[in-house]
Image (cartoon, rainbow, N blue to C red):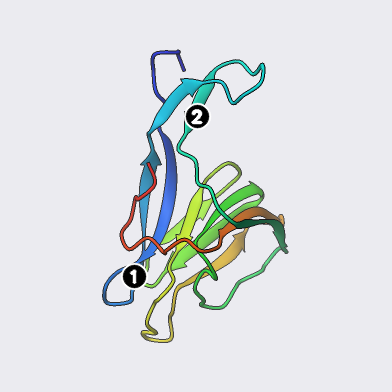
């Protein structure tokens, strides 16, 4: 990446449509500004900030783990740190993510349909999946995909 080339960082966004059905769409973070993070740090590409109250945690899903259908408890970023992980939305889209991939969980307010509500996730492969989760409190659930730039 050269200094003149703004980065584009892909992410998956799981969201709920007006009918209450969850979908996943690949989006991209593209709004970056070259500058210092502060102090004596050298310039780097900085994306838009999200501020407010949030909770950060690390979870470990064992080999063979398959979750039941559920909604994300709050709007949240999910970043696999190791292992592989899959997410299936109500529309049948199934995405597999690995270390460094980004997923934004915004499938709140789904309506149950055919025994499905929200999404179902699972570990993939023969290693546990380690996830970093950043949950936001007090921000509205995005009502359309790709709201983060």
Q: Nearer the viewer, residue 137 or 98?
A: 137
Is residue 6 positioned above or below 118 on the image? above
Please give the name of the residue rendered at 49% of the width and 40% of the height, measured from the top-left corner: 49
Question: In the picture, residue 57 is in which quadrant?
Answer: bottom right
Give me the C-alpha separation between circle 1 and circle 2.
34 Å
Q: Residue furthest left?
A: 18
Comparing 115 with 78, the one in front is 78
Q: Along the horizontal axis of the image, is 96 left or right of 83? A: left
Query: In percent of the image, x 43 and y 68: which residue is there?
Result: 107
62 displayed left or right of 99: right
Q: How many marks?
A: 2
Quadrant including the C terminus? top left
**Measuring 34% from the left and 70% from the top, which residue is drawn there?**
91
- Secondary structure, mark 2, is strand
Look at discs 1 and 2 and give the one toward the viewer.
2
How far across and how far down the image is residue 94, in percent? 43, 62
Write the residue at 50% across / 46% down: 50
Secondary structure, mark 1, is: loop
Q: Badge 1 local density, few (<14 within 10 Å), some, or many (20+)?
A: few
Whole-percent x, y for residue 47 in the image: 47, 34
Front residue of 29 and 42: 42
Relative to 82, say whether 109 is above or below.
below
Residue 51 percent across, percent down from the top left? 53, 48
Which residue position is annotated with label 1? 91
Residue for badge 2 = 46
Q: Position of residue 76 (x, y in %)?
A: 53, 58
Classify mark 2: residues with Cα within 10 Å, few (<14), some (14-19) or many (20+).
some
| Numbered label attached to residue 21 | none
Comes first in the chain, label 1 or label 2: 2
- From this view, report whether residue 36 is shown above or below residue 142: above
């Amino acid at each position: 990446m050269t200094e003149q080339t703004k980065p584009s960082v892909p992410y998956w966004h799981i969201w709920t449509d007006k009918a209450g059905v969850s979908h996943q769409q690949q989006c991209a973070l593209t709004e970056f500004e070259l500058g210092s993070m502060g102090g004596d740090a050298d310039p780097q590409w900085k994306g838009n900030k999200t501020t407010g109250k949030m909770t950060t945690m690390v979870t470990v899903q064992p080999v063979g783990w398959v979750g039941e259908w559920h909604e994300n408890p709050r709007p949240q970023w999910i970043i696999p740190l190791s292992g592989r992980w899959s997410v299936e939305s109500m529309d049948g889209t199934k995405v597999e993510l690995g270390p460094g991939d980004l997923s934004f969980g915004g499938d709140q307010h789904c309506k149950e349909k055919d025994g499905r509500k929200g999404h179902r996730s699972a570990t993939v492969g023969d290693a546990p999946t380690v996830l970093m989760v950043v949950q936001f409190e007090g921000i509205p659930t995005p009502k359309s995909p790709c709201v983060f730039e």
